[in-house]
Image (cartoon, rainbow, N blue to C red):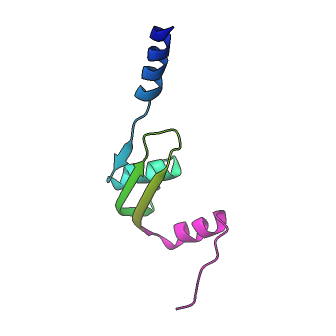
């Protein structure tokens, strides 16, 4: 019984691994689940995901989109552009 408990604990804790990258292309892939489109220039980024089951994460991505990409992004995500300055 002790052996089974130790084995289960080892399997549970060994499956946890942190994700951490500063490669902009990889950050985009973690964020969107796909490769970046050709009309989007990725400048820099950072992605971190916790090593435990809660999957906490932090992400930042600096990019230079085309006007078409940006307008599509706004429509798809139902965003309102803040025009106040």
| Residue 43 x, y percent position in the rendering | 34, 64
Residue at screen point 58% across, 87% down: 83
Say which quarter of the image contains residue 72.
bottom right
**Front in this rendered view, residue 2 or 53:** 2
Viewer can see residue 63: yes
| Residue 2 x, y percent position in the rendering | 47, 10
Q: Image height check: is 16 above or below 67?
A: above
Q: Image height check: is 60 above or below 52?
A: below
| Residue 66 x, y percent position in the rendering | 47, 70
Q: Image height check: is 69 above or below 13?
A: below
Residue at screen point 34% across, 49% down: 21
Residue at screen point 40% across, 36% down: 17
Say which quarter of the image contains residue 7.
top left
Query: Magenta stretch: residue 28 in it?
Result: no
Viewer can see residue 36: no
- Residue positioned most to the front: 2
| Residue 12 x, y percent position in the rendering | 48, 26
Query: Magenta stretch: residue 69 in it?
Result: yes
Left or right of 70 on screen, residue 36: left
Residue at screen point 52% across, 46% down: 33
**Front in this rendered view, residue 70 or 7:** 7
Residue stretch in magenta: 64-85
């Amino acid at each position: 019984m002790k052996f089974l408990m130790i084995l289960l604990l080892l399997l549970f804790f060994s499956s946890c691994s942190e994700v951490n990258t500063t490669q902009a292309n990889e950050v985009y892939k973690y964020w969107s689940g796909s490769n970046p489109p050709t009309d989007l220039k990725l400048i820099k980024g950072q992605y971190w995901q916790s090593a435990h089951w809660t999957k906490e994460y932090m992400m930042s991505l600096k990019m230079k989109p085309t006007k078409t990409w940006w307008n599509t992004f706004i429509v798809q995500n139902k965003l309102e552009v803040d025009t106040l300055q």
